[in-house]
Amino acid sequence: MLIQPMKSSDVRSSEVTPKSIYLDRRRFLRTAALAGVGAAMGPMAGAALAGAGMKLPGLVKSSHSTAEEPTPYDKVTIYNNFYEFGTAKGDPGKYAGGLTTKPWSVAVEGEVAKPAVYDVEDLIRPHTLEERIYRLRCVETWSMVVPWVGISLGDLIKRLEPTSKAKYVAFETLHDPEQMRGQSYPALRWPYDEGLRMDEALHPLTILAVGLYGEEMPNQNGAPVRLVVPWKYGFKCIKSIVRMRFQETMPETAWSRQTPGEYGFFANVNPGVDHPRWSQAKERRLGEFLKRKTLMFNGYADEVAHLYTGMDLTKYY
Ligand code: MTE
């Protein structure tokens, strides 16, 4: 997202914590945390989250995965947008490591039969953990291919039993300026929030991701749980979610509130609708030199175009 000019040297390799050190530090913190809360949480089963940097067990390969080559782990985890930790692409990798992600609660509210404050483990555990290799297209025109690990958001929503009034689901990120140094500055109105229409949230491609590359989610990518909606621009993929609210009205969202003329609620990848300040026709895959053509709905048109039949996508951008 662009509200402040980016420096060309967003990430200097010398500033980035090497993966081995970062993982060791998180392993230590996680082991300490687990020792403290394990007894209270009871035994873990099924899709329970593993320790930091550890492989997530029992992953099922998804039929929704692309066969394209995944973007290298190092690129996916050091070139990030997570304004809660700063607006430069290297900031999340540098500053998100200290965020405590266990225990972690998610409040489920609004038009739903099972509202409660859930431990994230309890939300995820009953579901199948899948590896979903998805293209992700950022509105800033870079893209990547990520092997996410996650569960179907639709399956979770069905378990929570929304009422017939639930037309949208709104999401919120943690608001904790002590842990999230970027929230001391008004880069956005905090907390970061996002939303989906119910049919988008229930779509089989939409997931809640808890990891990538077979491992638990790195903090800079949105630990412990984030949204991934592969046919929409990356800013819809809200990170470190603490609240899900089912509601009748369309929710406000962080970027459409910030600059409504540039970012809309739907944010479907659309090479035919330019951003007011740049073209969306092409994209650069991280790690590649030549640009490639951006595809309608990020290449997922066969699966999702029907959701928008009859809608003027230049108006509902
Ligand atoms: N979620 C929160 N809470 N804060 C953010 O700043 N940035 C969004 C999205 N989710 C953002 C967020 C944007 S603009 C993008 S492109 C993706 O996260 C980037 O995800 P990645 O860093 O895992 O590639």
Image: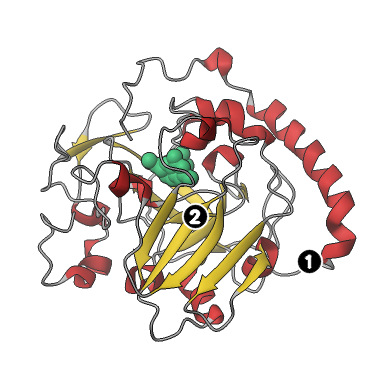
From the top left corner, tell me how far across and down residue 229 is, in percent: 38, 57
- The crowd level at tag 1 (other Cα within 10 Å; few <14, some 14-19, many 20+) is few
Q: At 28% across and 35% down in the image, what residue appears?
A: 140
Residue 172 image label: 2
Mark 2 residue CB less than 8 A from any atom of ligand 1: no
Whichever of callouts 2 and 1 sits on the residue coming sooner in the sequence is 1
As drawn, 129 above or below 133: below
Specify the quarter for ligand 1: top left
Residue 150 appears in view: no
In the image, taking residue 196 as reference, residue 265 lies left or right, namely left
Quadrant location of the C terminus in the rendered image: bottom left
Closest to the observer: 140 or 258? 258
- The crowd level at tag 2 (other Cα within 10 Å; few <14, some 14-19, many 20+) is many
Q: Closer to us: mark 2 or mark 1?
A: 2
Amino acid tagged 2: Glu
In the image, taking residue 45 as reference, residue 222 lies left or right, namely left
As drawn, 163 above or below 143: below
Q: Is label 1 in a helix, a strand or a loop?
A: loop
Which residue corresponds to mark 1?
44
From the top left corner, tell me how far across and down residue 8 is, in percent: 35, 16
